[in-house]
Image (tube, rainbow, N blue to C red):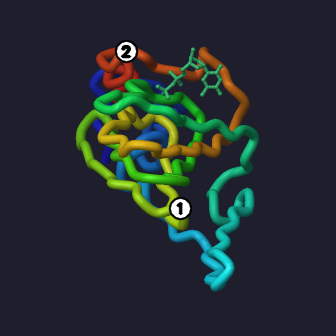
């Protein structure tokens, strides 16, 4: 039962219930990717909508990250992402405004699915690491929360 402290309309309440169900930390998880072992070198593949649980519209990657650097420090309103350590390792800290969890990524056959409305920070990059991110939409600055307090407020609406 969801409380209604600000007298939200039934539609707004329903939307809040939907958001709170699908935009929680519990929905973010490590997904095992297929691995074709081969003495010539292993192979992993990712199919849009199958291994990454959304349609992939964009790929970007972080590389040449200097020691001690931190990335992220934002949340997305509707964007789904899938984060893979293509090389080396790093940590992803996820926070839904209530709970926080740290994931250590160090294998190119594991991906971390991050649903919308999750604050993320990345740190502890090993030397030479490459962080590849598959995203459900093209880049849109309007989809970002870059202020943590604003993000938490919005999550609790
Ligand atoms: P940002 O998402 O803040 O990086 P991170 O979360 O890795 O720290 O993006 C850094 C800059 O790059 C910012 O100016 C926006 C730009 N950018 C794009 O132009 N396209 C993209 O797909 C991404 C992810 C970022």
- As drawn, is 33 to the left or to the right of 69? right
Kind of element beneath mark 2: loop
Reading the image, the residue beneath label 1 is 108
Q: Quadrant of residue 49?
A: bottom right
**Mark 2 neighbour class, 10 Å CA radius: few under 14, some 14 to 19, many 20 or more:** few
Disc 2 + disc 1, Cβ < 8 Å: no
The answer to whether 75 is drawn above or below residue 149 in the figure is below
Q: Is mark 1 within 8 Å of ligand 1?
A: no
x and y percentages locating residue 57 in the rendered image: 75, 41
Q: Is mark 2 within 8 Å of ligand 1?
A: no
Q: Quadrant of residue 69?
A: top left
Residue toward you, 30 or 24: 30
**Mark 1 neighbour class, 10 Å CA radius: few under 14, some 14 to 19, many 20 or more:** many
Task: Choose the circle earlier in sequence order: 2 or 1.
Answer: 1
Q: What distance separates the C-alpha of mark 2 from that of mark 1?
A: 31 Å
x and y percentages locating residue 131 in the rendered image: 52, 44
Which image quarter has ligand 1? top right
x and y percentages locating residue 93 in the rendered image: 32, 42
Which residue corresponds to the image point at 66% horizontal and 20% vertical from the top-left?
140
Which residue corresponds to the image point at 64% horizontal and 64% vertical from the top-left?
51
- As drawn, is 71 to the left or to the right of 116? left
Q: Nearer the viewer, mark 2 or mark 1?
A: 1
Residue toward you, 9 or 71: 71
Which residue corresponds to the image point at 59% horizontal and 35% vertical from the top-left?
79
Reading the image, the residue beneath label 2 is 147
Residue toward you, 141 or 60: 60
Question: Which part of the image, by quadrant, shows the C terminus?
Answer: top left
The answer to whether 35 is drawn above or below residue 131 in the figure is below
Kind of element beneath mark 1: loop
x and y percentages locating residue 113 in the rendered image: 50, 53
Which residue corresponds to the image point at 44% horizontal and 32% vertical from the top-left?
65
């Amino acid at each position: 039962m969801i409380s209604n402290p600000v007298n939200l309309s039934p539609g707004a309440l329903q939307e809040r219930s939907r958001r709170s169900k699908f935009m929680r930390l519990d929905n973010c998880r490590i997904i095992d990717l297929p691995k074709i072992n081969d003495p010539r070198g292993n192979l992993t593949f990712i199919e849009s909508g199958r291994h990454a649980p959304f349609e992939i519209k964009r790929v970007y990657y972080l590389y040449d990250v200097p020691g001690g650097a931190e990335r992220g420090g934002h949340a997305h309103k509707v964007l789904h992402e899938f984060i893979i350590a293509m090389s080396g390792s790093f940590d992803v800290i996820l926070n839904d405004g209530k709970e926080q969890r740290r994931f250590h990524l160090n294998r190119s056959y594991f991906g971390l699915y991050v649903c919308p409305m999750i604050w993320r920070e990345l740190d502890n990059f090993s030397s030479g690491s490459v962080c590849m991110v598959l995203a459900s939409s093209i880049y849109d600055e309007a989809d970002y929360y870059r202020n943590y307090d604003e993000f938490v407020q919005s999550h609790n609406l």
